[in-house]
Image: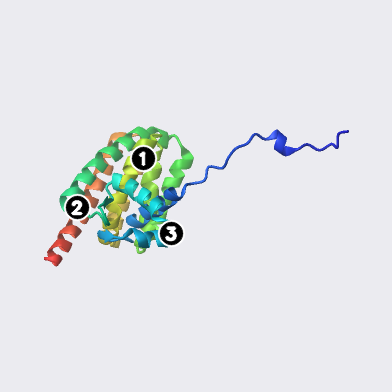
């Protein structure tokens, strides 16, 4: 006799939850920490990292191998070294960023222009940067959100991943050297210029302003590295 009830478990096909693995969790947190400058250039030990995460050394080593592939650390026999960037390496990174980010923006520009919701989100990111020009951490978060939303609109995940890796490599230096309201305001004018050009359908101008923006950021960070090098001599 039917009870009038159905067994929901019989109606829904199994769908396992895709949980991140322990190495994935360690990798993401370490990558975030490296971007924030938590670990300074130089050697760090695996055991304290494993103790911090409450795991064995094995998942930490696996996470570090992924970070090594991205150029963020170097694994040696008995230690890990957080890599530093020389000025020439910084120039190389920004040269690559300029090409990849300009390509992403050109690819995405028409999609951005046609997406009213995305345009509104980009406007809000710019407004957030205005509000936080005296709070470098909040400003940089809004800045990254602005750029990455544009690049992701290209619909090319591999390209977005490559750009993200280059941002992580440079981010600690941005935190050290790009921290004045004056530099933030100059960057804001360029952000507005990029968005205005996209809205006008002038994709060439948008990418030109983006390249100028990256070039000026590189100049600020390079000057900071030169000052730091002189102070150490």
The residue at 25%/38% (across/down) is 99
Q: CA distance from mark 3 to mark 1?
A: 28 Å
Where's residue 181, x and y in %? 30, 62
Of labels 2 and 1, the one closer to you = 1
| Callout in the foreground (2, 3) | 3
In which image quadrant can residue 175 be found? bottom left
Q: CA distance from mark 2 to mark 3?
A: 38 Å
Q: Which of 224 and 162 lies nearest the eye of the viewer?
A: 162
Q: Quadrant of residue 41?
A: bottom left
Question: x%, y% of residue 111?
Answer: 41, 34
Q: Is residue 55 left or right of residue 182?
A: right
- Marks 3, 1: nearer the viewer: 3
Q: Residues within 10 Å of mark 3 (few under 14, many from 20)?
A: some
Considering every residue shown, the one lying at the far left of the view is: 233
Which residue in the protein does label 1 denote? 160
Q: Is residue 65 above or below residue 7?
A: below
Q: Which residue position holds label 2?
A: 219
Q: Is residue 171 rendered to the left or right of residue 20? A: left
* Residue under the point 22% across and 51% down: 218
The colour scheme is rainbow
- The reply to whether residue 53 is in sight is yes
Give the residue number, with chain letter if any, for mark 3.
53
Q: Residue at x 34, y 58 (%)?
A: 46
């Amino acid at each position: 006799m039917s009870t009038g009830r159905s067994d929901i478990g019989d109606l829904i096909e199994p769908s396992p939850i895709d949980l991140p693995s322990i190495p994935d969790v360690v990798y993401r947190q370490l990558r975030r920490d490296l971007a924030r400058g938590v670990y300074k250039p130089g050697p760090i030990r695996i055991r304290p990292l494993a103790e911090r995460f409450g795991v064995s050394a094995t998942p930490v080593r696996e996470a570090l191998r992924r970070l090594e592939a991205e150029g963020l650390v170097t694994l040696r026999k008995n230690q890990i070294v957080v890599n530093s960037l020389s000025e020439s390496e910084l120039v190389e990174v920004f040269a690559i960023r300029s090409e990849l980010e300009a390509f992403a923006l050109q690819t995405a520009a028409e999609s951005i222009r046609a997406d009213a919701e995305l345009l509104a989100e980009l406007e809000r990111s710019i407004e957030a940067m205005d509000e936080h020009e005296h709070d470098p951490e909040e400003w940089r978060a809004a800045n990254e959100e602005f750029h990455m939303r544009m690049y992701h609109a290209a619909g090319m995940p591999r390209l977005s991943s490559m750009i993200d890796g280059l941002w992580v490599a440079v981010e600690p230096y941005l935190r050290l050297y790009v921290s004045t309201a004056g530099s933030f305001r100059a960057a804001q004018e360029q952000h507005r210029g990029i968005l205005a050009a996209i809205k006008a359908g002038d994709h060439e101008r948008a990418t030109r302003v983006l390249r100028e923006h990256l070039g000026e950021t590189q100049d600020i960070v390079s000057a900071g590295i030169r000052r730091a090098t002189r102070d150490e001599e």
